[in-house]
Image: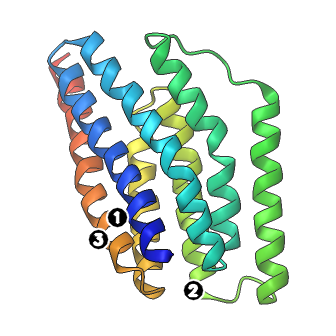
Amino acid sequence: MLQLLQLLGGGLYLLNKIFLSVSERIRHRGRQTKARRWRVASWIVYLAGLGPIVAMFILKRNWIAASVEASGAPSMILGLVTALRTGEIKRAPRWLDVLALIFIVLGFTISIREFGGLTLLTQWLEVGLVTGFLIGTYQLAKEHKTGYLWFVLMHVSCGWLMWVEDLRLMFWQQVVSLGFIADAYMTTQRKRSLR
């Protein structure tokens, strides 16, 4: 079961990073409509990969990661809506922020109760993972390129966690994703330096 979840969730999350990278490269060439299509596709596959990833974290008892990953769904939906509206960024409804906060508190509470505090390396890796995930996803949903930098923290923390927990497919997916995140970020920096 874990292998299937790694392949499905990890594959869809990797496609998200590939599509983001392609979108930035196309946007850099000034083809906004085509770039928007790739960005829409990136948010769709990101949402599709969410269920298998959350299930994998639950099976491995990574409660912080599972609950906070699930709380990222509103930011993913905001990203999709923003991409569909041709980049028109709207303020997220307040209830999305409240929902995310509830999930964060729930995940930390379950993890601390089950493990007697923040005592394990895996819990600290989960904290790095979820910090990068939540801030990065929210920033990218708002079209802020610094979201890519937060994704670096997420992928490094997640990759290390996957290595420790012997989930090798997910580890390698994190490594490959880092390459596409770096490419997308560097593309945005080249675009900025041309201005």
Q: Which residue is mark 2?
A: 121
Quadrant housing residue 21: top left
Question: Where 65 sits versus 75, above or below?
Answer: below
Q: Is residue 67 above or below residue 33?
A: below
Q: Residue at x 27, y 12 (%)?
A: 32
Report how far apart the C-alphas of labels 2 and 1 lie in the structure.
18 Å
Residue 5 position in % (x across, y down): 48, 66
Alpha-carbon span between mark 3 and mark 2: 20 Å
Residue ID at (19%, 23%): 26
Q: Quadrant of residue 31?
A: top left
Q: Dot 2: what SS? A: helix
Q: Which residue is at the front of the view, 8 or 172?
A: 8
For the residues labelled 3 and 1, the Cα–Cα distance comes to 5 Å
From the viewer's side, name the closer residue of 34 and 187: 34
Give me the disc on residue 172. Answer: 3
Q: Quadrant of the C terminus?
A: top left
Dot placed on the residue nearer the N-terminal end, 3 or 2: 2
Name which residue type carries label 2. Leu
How many neighbours does mark 3 have within 10 angstroms: few (below 14), some (14-19), or many (20 or more)?
Answer: some
User: What label does residue 174 carry, if any?
Assistant: 1
State yes or no: discs 3 and 1 in contact (Cβ < 8 Å). yes
Residue 188 pos. (x, y %): 26, 31
Q: Position of residue 66 (x, y in %)?
A: 65, 64
Which tag, 2 or 1, sits closer to the chain's start?
A: 2
Q: What crowding class fits label 1: few (fewer than 14 Cα within 10 Å), some (14-19), or many (20 or more)?
A: many
Q: Is residue 107 above or below residue 44?
A: below
